[in-house]
Amino acid sequence: IKENALKAFSSAQNSQELYGFKVQYLGKSGSLTESMKLMATLPKEEKPLFGKMVNEIKTELEAAYEQAEASLKNKEIDAKMLSEKLDLSFSTAAKEQGKEHPIHKVTNEIFSIMARLGYSLRTGPLIEKDYYNFEALNIPPNHPARDMQDTFFVDESHVLRTHTSPIQIHSLENEKPPLRIIGTGPVFRCDSDISHLPNFHQIEGMCVDEKVSMSDLKGTISFFVREFFGPGLKTRFRPSFFPFTEPSAEVDCSCPICKGKGCSMCKQTGWIEIGGSGLINPKVFAHANVEYPKWQGFAFGFGVERMAIIKYGVDDIRHFPSNDVRFLKQF
Ligand code: PHE
């Protein structure tokens, strides 16, 4: 038994096979264990000697098993390491690289242009009290101007901000004029088509100082538009209405998709509206306890996606939230 077992142990090719041999010889009904049964057939005086001999063989075989197991395990680990070795010279397909989102890029460009005019950055909450989104901006409850903005309501007194103009109020309440601020971030309106997204971005500018006029507004916006789009682009100011500015003007840029001839993006007008502007309505100053006419001001709010569309000739506003890397790569 001993010789057969030793031979088997040293012939085993892997630890599984070796374990099989262990069971065969040393297991509960293995041959060595079975041989103990022979003891009953022996004369009394031979029994202790026989028992001693079987136990010695058992100890010896267990040691041989452990040694064989250790060397097989080592070999198996070596083989595994060899098969899992990394070949660092192996070339793989190039990974797609992410890109900065055009909205982020455009927003940063706008900041740096406005920073040169002394404007600094402000933000505000996306969920606004009705007061900041409407009332303080001279849009009282039930005023028809509320229909201009398709509002998402959170509850009776809170809305998802429909524009960045509430940032004007936060700044007027918390800071002392003179002020030159630029606010930005997402805004929300219940509206979606080729040129409207329910979640888009605005950039808001506000200047409050002594003696601010419509010509300051036009000069600032014209400078900004020229710096952002380059000198070739046409802009126009159209008389308009916003409850929080008086007088008010809409700012349009010529449509780059059809070069002013008329297409679906510009609704056949040849112009794309980038936003509104105007002189701050004294009623807004009154809400925020800012002394008028000592302090006067202008404000504007532009759509960031619209500006990116015009600058880069994007033919559908819905590309922006798609995050398709083939689109993002082009900027
Ligand atoms: N808040 C206006 C809008 O979203 C734009 C605007 C901003 C108009 C500031 C005038 C002054 O349509």
Image: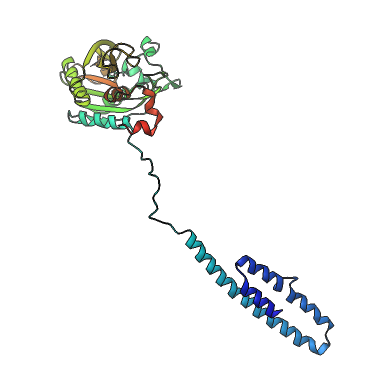
The residue nearer to you, when weighing 75 against 43, is 75
Query: Which image quarter: residue 141?
Result: top left
Looking at the image, is 178 positioned above or below residue 90? Answer: above
Query: Could you tell me how many numbered marks the image carries?
Result: 0
Residue at position x 31%, y 17% in the image? 137
The residue nearer to you, when weighing 125 against 63, is 63
In this rendering, would 60 be left or right of 299? right
Query: Which image quarter: residue 72?
Result: bottom right
In this rendering, would 102 be left or right of 115? right
Residue at position x 22%, y 26% in the image? 228
Residue 83 image offset from top left, x and y in percent? 49, 60
Decide if residue 110 is in sight here: yes
The residue furthest bottom is 45
In this rendering, would 120 be left or right of 138? left
Residue 255 image offset from top left, x and y in percent? 27, 17
Residue 278 image offset from top left, x and y in percent? 24, 15
Looking at the image, is 68 positioned above or below residue 268? Answer: below
Residue 24 image offset from top left, x and y in percent? 71, 71
In what quadrant does ligand 1 lie? top left
In this rendering, would 39 be left or right of 116? right
Decide if residue 295 is in sight here: no
For the C terminus, the quadrant is top left
Looking at the image, is 5 positioned above or below residue 222? Answer: below
Q: Which color scheme did the rendering employ for the protein?
A: rainbow
For the N terminus, the quadrant is bottom right
The residue nearer to you, when weighing 224 against 318, is 318
Query: Which image quarter: residue 7?
Result: bottom right
Residue at position x 30%, y 19% in the image? 257
